[in-house]
Amino acid sequence: GYHFPKPMLFVNVSTPEKKKTYLLNWLSAHPLWISQVNIHLLSKFPSPQMWRDFLNTIDTDPLPSTKTASMKLAMWDILGEAIINSAQGLTGAPQEITWQGMQGNPPLLFMRSLLWELYELNFHYELYVLDQALVPDCWTTSNEEQITCQTLLYGIFPGESGLVMWSESLPCHSCELGLCATDMPNSLPYISKFCQLMSVWPGAPACLQSPVELKGQDDMEVYSVFSLACHFYVQTAFDLLGQQPSLPHIF
């Protein structure tokens, strides 16, 4: 399953009304679902079809024993009654959708910002899951070791909120984009921690074992190492998760 809806679910929508329904349902579930994912460490997550059905508004009336009913019960089990009941699409919906101080039905910036956040959330939690699966001893041996792993992981993401970056304001400048910052001095600390985290994964490229450093004005070596790290990450994620991983995007 997926921790969060894939952004393409919001893009491949046939009508403006349906897109508004998807947005309203996601934003109604947004804070409660993220808190469940972050605090309760859920063992099950919705499949792409489950997310699509949820965003399209789930009929809360009981159904006879059918395949559709079984799917609905599975969604209730994963998402929870409070989230299912909160997502009622256009029923009683406000004229304007509001999120992060923006209003619209939706304007381009609103949609771009929401999709950017979904890419970030999916990337953050997938990286978290992968690190726990590939180096489990680092997360289970002692509280001190866990804190060390957590600190390194959170250092890959800009801001002070760790995985729950959704609690912070949207970035205003490219220097706030972490791995996607457009200039090397701003992106280097995040690239370095990203490489350091993966350096202990099985099969990691040898170049990740050494600190990533900027030598003078020549940043080609850093880009070369980062490129190898990204290829290794994508392949490892695909092998373990069985699906194409989410990657951070430029805002």
Image (cartoon, rainbow, N blue to C red):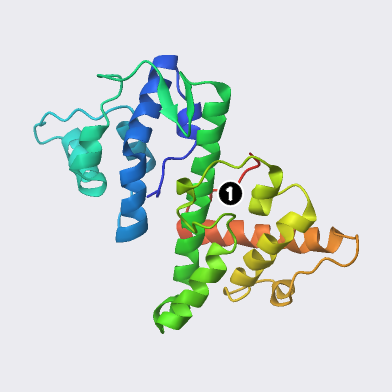
Residue 114 point in image, percent of width and height = 50, 35
- Give amino acid for label 1: Leu
Q: Tell me: residue 192, above or below residue 20.
A: below
The image shows residue 134, relative to residue 87, as above or below, that is below
Residue 223 placement, left or right of 22: right
Rendered residue at 67%/58% (across/down): 231
59 shown above or below 4: above
Q: Residue at label 1?
A: 247
Asked if one can make out residue 135 in the rendered structure from this viewpoint, the answer is no
Taking the image as shown, residue 137 lies to the left or right of residue 93, namely: right
Q: Which x, y percent locates residue 41?
A: 33, 61
Q: Is residue 136 visible?
A: yes
Quadrant position of the C terminus in the picture: top right
For the residue pair 12 and 219, the one nearer the viewer reads as 219
* Secondary structure found at label 1: loop
Front residue of this view, candidates 173 and 193: 173
> Between residues 87 and 62, which one lies in front from this camera angle?
87
Q: Quadrant of residue 32?
A: top left
Task: Measuring from the top left, give residue 175's x and y in whole percent.
Answer: 70, 48
Q: Residue at x 34, y 51 (%)?
A: 35
Instruction: Tell me the crowding category of disc 1: few under 14, some 14 to 19, or many 20 or more residues within 10 angstroms, Cα based.
Output: some
